[in-house]
Amino acid sequence: MKQALRDGQQDVDLVGQPPQAGEVRSHVGGEVLFFAPKPLPTAKISEGGIGESNQIIAMNDVYLDFGQSNNGKAYQVQVVQFINSVGILTMLCIFLLAAHLNGNRYGTEGMFWYYLIELMRTELFVWGLLCFTELIGWFAVVQTTWQKSRQRPIRFHRQRREVCYYPQGSDTPVIAPWEEVIAWCGTHQGFTGDAIVNNATFGMAIPTPDGKDYWVLKKPVMLVSEAQRTWEVIRCYMEEPAENWAKPAEPETTKTFENEREVNWIFFQRGPKHWFKVDFFTPYLSYPGMVGYYLFHILTFWKLPYWVSQWDQKFTMASYPPSIEAWSQPLPPEQWAQPSAELESQKAALKEHMAAGGTLATFYQANAGNKQGELSNHIECHSSK
């Protein structure tokens, strides 16, 4: 990333043409809506805060570590093990059937075991393919953990109103002012060869030490509202009182599996129980559902995926150097950094604008005269919910 953000098919200049919160910039195939600098809310905050977020690694009254938790790692391992377990069972069934048919054909005692052993010994290609598939799956499991460990979480210091990040693969921390962070949601269309698909991205650009460029974090999201929520997790922590903060999601451990199994069993015992109602997410509703639930976990080696998830959590939790640990310490209230007068003025005006039914994009449009694009309509729909 040098001087411009590439989102979709066209560069969006961040240095030569600094963005403003609420600004919508069009590019070939899509748009970019900026949430910051001068971080502004994207919607009215609902009562009770934002709920849980699996992107919060650690959080207290002083700082928030934003990154990627181990949620989903157990499922990744389960997919790998399930595919290979089904493959092995399928081949064993084929070998057993072939040995049975050959044994009956010749009618000689002991021919079944002879043919079974011969098939398993001679079909080395099949066993090699299954082993190769297993290795590929576990390579993906380890590689994603390794990649995550190479990028430390971004630390947001609430009291200092500063951000600490590590450039990709670097061991040198960089600290930047919070209000200078650029955040956005970008949309663009892609062509798969058969259909046109819409893609969304959440991104942040944090100034480099010389102030001439930006370090960029980009994260694909399913919906524009997901990018909006990701931003609000960070912004609410830095700008809003504690009752509006998101809560960290519990990390995946073997205890997660034990609790889930216990809950399913309790609900199954209480009933009602059905014979033909099967739902992967609520297996306790039926007998086949519970049989499938236990069979799935047996084929995926029971607690193994959750042991791997625990390992992922420990391996990727890189420690910070003493200088950053000192920087992360709480400050006396009289030393807390305060929002800029410009930000306070914009927030007050935006809250009044939103109370009247407006949005961040229409607020910018009213103040800067920019044309509102399609992306701002997505935000407006989400904000009105």
Image (cartoon, rainbow, N blue to C red):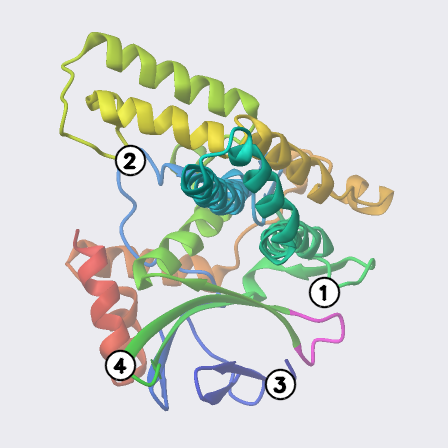
Q: Which residue is mark 2?
A: 280
What number is the disc on residue 3?
A: 3
Left or right, 319 with reference to 365: right
Q: Residue furthest right?
A: 322
Question: Neighbour class for label 1 at 10 Å: few (<14), some, many (≥20)?
Answer: some
Q: Amino acid at mark 1?
A: Gln
Location of residue 43 (image quadrant): bottom left
Location of residue 128 (image quadrant): bottom right
Counting residues from the N terminus, which is met first, the one under dot 3 or under dot 4?
Answer: 3
The label nearer to you, 3 versus 2, is: 2
Which sits in the foreground, 84 or 47? Answer: 84
Quadrant where the N terminus sits is bottom right
Q: Say whether marks 1 and 2 touch (CB < 8 Å).
A: no
Q: Amino acid at mark 4?
A: Ala
Q: Which residue is mark 4?
A: 195
Report the number of discs: 4
Measure how far apart labels 3 and 4 are at the Cα level: 33 Å
Question: Neighbour class for label 2 at 10 Å: few (<14), some, many (≥20)?
Answer: few
Q: Secondary structure at mark 4?
A: loop
Residue displayed at 25% across by 8% down: 269
Counting residues from the N terminus, which is met first, the one under dot 4 or under dot 2?
Answer: 4
Counting residues from the N terminus, which is met first, the one under dot 1 or under dot 3?
Answer: 3
The label nearer to you, 1 versus 4, is: 4
Is residue 322 positioned above or below 262 on the image?
below
Counting residues from the N terminus, which is met first, the one under dot 1 or under dot 4?
Answer: 1
The label nearer to you, 3 versus 4, is: 4
Which sits in the foreground, 29 or 60? Answer: 29
Measure how far apart labels 1 and 4 are at the Cα level: 34 Å
Q: Is any part of residue 46 visible from this angle? A: yes
What number is the disc on residue 168?
A: 1
Question: Neighbour class for label 3 at 10 Å: few (<14), some, many (≥20)?
Answer: some
